[in-house]
Image: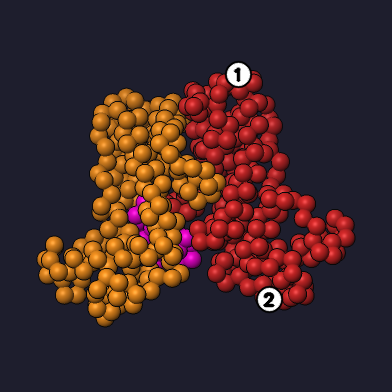
Chain colours: A orange, B red
Amino acid sequence: MNHDIAWPGSVRPGGRTARVRESVLQVAGDLLAERGFAHLDLAEVAATAGVGKTTVYRRWRTPAGLVADLLVEMAEQSLPRADTGDLLEDLTVNARLVARTLADPRQGNLFRAVIAAATCDDATATALHTFYDTRLTEWAPCVDAAVARGEAPPGTDARAVVSAVSAPLYYRLLASGDPIDEATADRAARVAAIAAAAGAFVG
Amino acid sequence: MNHDIAWPGSVRPGGRTARVRESVLQVAGDLLAERGFAHLDLAEVAATAGVGKTTVYRRWRTPAGLVADLLVEMAEQSLPRADTGDLLEDLTVNARLVARTLADPRQGNLFRAVIAAATCDDATATALHTFYDTRLTEWAPCVDAAVARGEAPPGTDARAVVSAVSAPLYYRLLASGDPIDEATADRAARVAAIAAAAGAFVG
């Protein structure tokens, strides 16, 4: 995904264009969380954000285009990875961040809405995969550093370890409906760290 | 969920009522996999299945009612759990079953469609949670048996171990878009078994 899109009429970071984007994405996120992708309407987003309808249609074109840009912003605003010098601690920070996000009513609904939209819209699916790729790429160095420190064997698949931390939390959000809390997050991190140390993520 | 629903006009298991249900659910699954929940239309299901429209509306009432019954059937037809006498082997059988299901084009799309529908329809969400509850309850005794054999410590949360096997596969299906193959399945089982043996699922 291109993070350096020069919007038509863009002036400078932090200028009017950036403020318009911020307002529009805030409203889009609110509407997605409240009502889902099927009811995301560009004209309503424009009206609620106090932005001209033409501006919104010209910049984002479709609801899928709006969701794609929202995912770019979510990836940009996602916290940088931890670097505590200990794999279990790093993974626990990550797990608690994901758990807090998914357990938050607005954010949890927003992720549910975007994931649902991605099941029937290819552009949204691509944007969603890019979002997770950005996050996995951000956090994978925690595992590589742990391998360098001797906490896990060489050949450990860093991306798989980081995915294993998030996976049980998403499984609860989307499949089983079991509650997402800090104990669940801590266990997800513990399971991944122990399995990584034992070499379960090699090959 | 009530597995003993007496449909209006039901006669006996395997009779005409059972055949009507089978045809209708087959068509509903096909349409869901092809086009998603938003386009599931009871009249079209009836016409395609060669069943009277009134029968379909009377028995299933809404698209959500149809999906709920489809999930009951999917849970009924899900294979019984493995019992190989070894935790890693049992979990590997489960992981490969889930991976084959999610990697199958029709079944993968069907799960995506139902999970998407559950994000915006409470009745479908309840039916989906019941489906996973049925599967987790079916497979949990593999872990309890492993604890009894001394392969994992007492207090191991069997449901969490079984969830941990499926979770990375669903994460690929719904979030990261990474491919789902047998190697992924085997690793998911290995990670869960090793972490369980190390006591990571206690507490």
For numbered disc 1, what is the local secondary structure? loop
**Any magenta on residue A128?**
yes
Is A28 displayed left or right of B63 in the figure? Answer: left
Furthest residue toward top:
B150
Query: Label 2, on which residue?
Result: B43
The circle on residue A109 is none
Residue A176 lies, in percent from the top left, at 55, 46
The segment highlighted magenta reads A115-132
- Say yes or no: labels 1 and 2 on the same chain: yes
Given contact means CB atoms under 8 Å apart, are the residues at marks 1 and 2 in contact?
no
What amino acid is found at the position of numbered circle 2 in the picture? Ala
Q: Residue at the spot x=27%, y=68% of the render?
A: A24
Q: Secondary structure at mark 2?
A: helix
* Image spot of residue B141 (x, y percent): 66, 31
Please give the chain letter of the residue carrying mark 2. B
Q: Give me the residue at 40% from left, 26% from top.
A: A197
| Residue B203 in the image: above or below residue A67 | above
Q: Quadrant of residue A110?
A: bottom left
Residue at the spot 56% in from the left edge and 58% down from the top edge:
B122
The prevailing secondary structure element of the residues shown in magenta is helix
The answer to which quarter of the image holds residue A58 is bottom left
**Residue A197 in magenta?**
no
Name the one closer to the observer, B10 or B80.
B10
- Measured as percent of width and height from the top left, residue A198 is found at 44, 26
Please name the residue that numbered disc 1 is placed on: B150
